[in-house]
Image (spheres, helix red, strand yellow):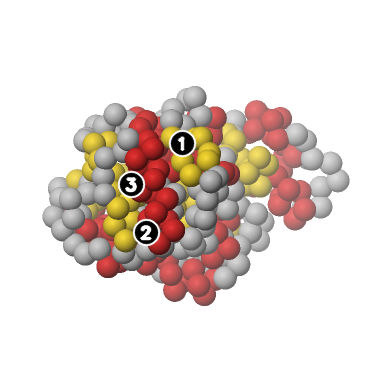
Amino acid sequence: MEMIEEGKAKVNVEGVFYNPWMKLSRDISVEVIKRIPDELYVLDGFAASGIRGIRYYLESGNVKQVDFLDINDVAVKRIKENMERNGVEGKIIKSYFEDLGTNQTYNFIEIDPFGSPAQYIYPAILMAKHKKRFYLSATATDTAVLCGRHKEACKRNYHSWPMHDWTCHETGLRILIKFMAEAAFLYDYNVEVLFSFYYRHQMKVILKLEKGVPKIHEQLALIDFIHKEETLQRGIGLKENAKWAGPLWIGPLFHPNYISKSIPLMELVSKELPVPFHHHLHEIAKHYKLSKVPKIDKVIKELGATRTHFSPLGFKTEKKIEEILEVLR
């Protein structure tokens, strides 16, 4: 028996996948979920030990029931033990996620597979397609694809072209949000990003989906391209002779009502300028062969920029590259 304690949960993870580095991701998800003003009936897809769904049930007062889905026999056994140990109400479903079918009772669906969540987004929406409002949470660990190491795979899986550079994690996260939003639009759902972030080879997005075509038409303007010129000047849209990525989400990465200041990463995200790209200090220094580079704190202060959670050496600003270089030199 391999017992671990996380949050309010105590679970046996013997023989099933458990990543202790993803505790922060689960902490953040709990903080978002407990702020949702609805009673939630959750499906924990790809549940493994059940740790995520169990924590949702124990730590979020609005979660009334969690059902756990996994195809692995050992996982099903562990989930049963862990549900009983923690007093969690719900059922265990031994099935492939995409075989569960439509018109389910869930209004919060968690997708946390190994690799890409892309093929599960449409089945998840179909499970709840008759509801006026529901919530969809997806985790992507195929960051090499979303960050542009495998550009053709990104185009195939997410219908977007990535940009493999020093700031690719933001581009990848925005591609993921765009893919989820477009899937929602197809079924007449507009979207609101409750919270999204990148952390240790993981991209996470929690969306609210609500029926309403007029708002979809407004949100279409939040799907665009970004470009990077030879000078490293970045901007929205396509530009001649510039590298580009997209289409991707250029809208907010969070909603202020879902921020917990007790978690530093959430607070950092909430303070980022609403610019759909960032600059990387070392990328600029290398490109312009700068012999000496000031500390990131000084750069941010003099530019009136903000830090970004995507990189400790990243910063967000609306200033032109010429103004950035004045500070760096």
For the C terminus, give its image quadrant.
top right
Residue 175 in sight from this viewpoint: no
Disc 1: which residue: 10
Q: CA distance from mark 3 to mark 1?
A: 28 Å
Q: Which mark is residue 70?
A: 2
Badge 2 crowding class, 10 Å Cα cut-off, few under 14, some 14 to 19, many 20 or more, is many
Counting residues from the start of the chain, the first of labels 2 and 3 encountered is 2
Which residue occupies the foreground of this view, 214 or 67?
Answer: 67
What kind of residue is marked 1?
Answer: Lys
Residue 177 position (above or below residue 116): above
Q: Is residue 61 left or right of residue 262?
A: left
Q: Residue at x 27, y 36 (%)?
A: 63
In x, y percent, where is residue 252?
A: 40, 43
Residue 148 position (above or below residue 110): below
Which residue occupies the foreground of this view, 99 or 177?
Answer: 99
What kind of residue is marked 2?
Answer: Asp
Q: Are marks 3 and 1 in contact (CB under 8 Å)?
A: no
Q: Which mark is residue 207?
A: 3
Badge 3 crowding class, 10 Å Cα cut-off, few under 14, some 14 to 19, many 20 or more, is many
Q: Which mark is residue 263?
A: none
What kind of residue is marked 3?
Answer: Leu
